[in-house]
Amino acid sequence: MAAKKIGVLTGGGDCPGLNAVIRAVAKTCLRRGCAVVGFRDGYAGLVENRFLEITDSSVSGILDRGGTVLGTSNIANPLAYTLPPYGTPASPSDMSGRVKEVFKEHGLDALVAIGGDGSMTIALELLRRGLPVVGVPKTIDNDLAATDVTFGFDSALAVASDAVDKVHTTAESHHRVIVVETMGRYAGWIALRAGIAGGGDVILIPEIPFSPEAVCAAIDSRRKRGKRFSIVVAAEGAVNLKGEQVVAKVVEGSPEPLRLGGIGYRIGEIVEKGCGIETRVVVLGHLQRGGTPTAHDRWLATRYGVHAAELALEGRHGMMSALHGTKITEVPIEEAVRHLRRVDPLGEEVKAARSVGTSFGSPEEITGKGGSCS
């Protein structure tokens, strides 16, 4: 029997394209006689029963808006709830029973959960507890397995690529090294593609450990060839040879407590000390999450939303919309969160970057004496 009422929420960090998914889910369901309820602030709205009835007019004009009209949260895990009055970081509560009550109260046939690996993991656990859930893959990090691309990534990449383009003129004018730090958590997709698109001279990503000596060697090599400036694009999760990352802070009670950040300044110090070149650092941070979604992300988000709505309407729960090649299909949510989708260090994209002279700060790149960094 076709669904008569579904819920929708956006969980985790915001990103461009969320509203396009909400719009696509709503319009698809409403045109088939199915009511839609939006839960505010991610899973917090589902626990605390904060919601709004979504109509055709309420999603009008939101296609090109960044963020999410429903609001979101990256700390509201209903299975280990830390928000008052139900729980605290020191004493989290399992609110899955409460979620079931809210489901029943609204008469929901299914929930469309839009989010990244953290939100999809929660969706999977709710599914295992008997709740009918369908997923939509969202993250600027592009690290969700079982789909070729997540929406939000293209918009973030556009911001990062534009930033790399813009710092070239200052770096060249002042004969400096400029380090651009991108987001991406444990995957280097944003840094890799922004670095390739923007002509970055050194790209540092989590999948390829770097050494200070190799970074300096690459910059020294350019200087010896008459290149008096260099651009380094560093993913926030870049690791050194010991596998160490730079952690900005720890957020207790969050499904993802580690907040990476600060690698740009660490690399800046390495370059100034080891290469003797004036260095500046640009941390893009949440600029990559904001603003108008690209046409590609609106297009992809709409297709994901339509397919998720169809899955919910047809009672095909436990599945997540996915892009394989040019086709929108579905995969089990369990498969999507099994592992992170990361850059292949030996893959074609990395090889292409190396072929045009880009360094990844690898020790094996050093030839001859290498850099002057100690």
Image: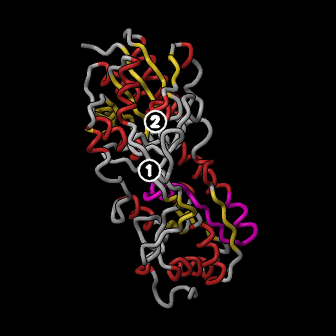
**Which of the two residues, 132 or 146, is positioned nearer the viewer here?**
132
Dot 2: few (<14), some (14–19), or many (≥20) neighbours within 10 Å? many
Direction from residue 53 to residue 94 in the image, left or right: left
Q: Is residue 332 a member of the stretch shown in magenta?
A: no
Which residue appears at 41% of the width and 39% of the height? 78
Q: Is residue 190 a member of the stretch shown in magenta?
A: yes
Image coordinates of residue 8 in percent, x first then y, are 43, 26
Direction from residue 334 to residue 59 in the image, left or right: right
For label 1, the residue is 255
Ranked by sequence position, the earlier of labels 1 and 2 is 2
Image coordinates of residue 187 in percent, x first then y, are 43, 57
Q: Report the residue that reaches farthest toward the right.
A: 174
| Callout 1 touching callout 2 (CB < 8 Å) | no
Give residue 249's quadrant in the image: bottom right
Q: Secondary structure at mark 2?
A: helix
Which amino acid, by three-letter code, is at mark 1?
A: Pro
Specify start and end residues of the magenta stretch as a single range. Answer: 167-192
**Which of the two residues, 343 or 356, is positioned nearer the viewer here?**
343
Image coordinates of residue 330 in percent, x first then y, are 28, 34
Which amino acid, by three-letter code, is at mark 2?
A: Tyr
Q: Report the residue that reaches farthest toward the top.
A: 33
For label 2, the residue is 43
Image height check: is 25 above or below 135?
Answer: above
Between the residue at mark 1 and the residue at mark 2, the CA separation in whole angstroms equals: 12 Å
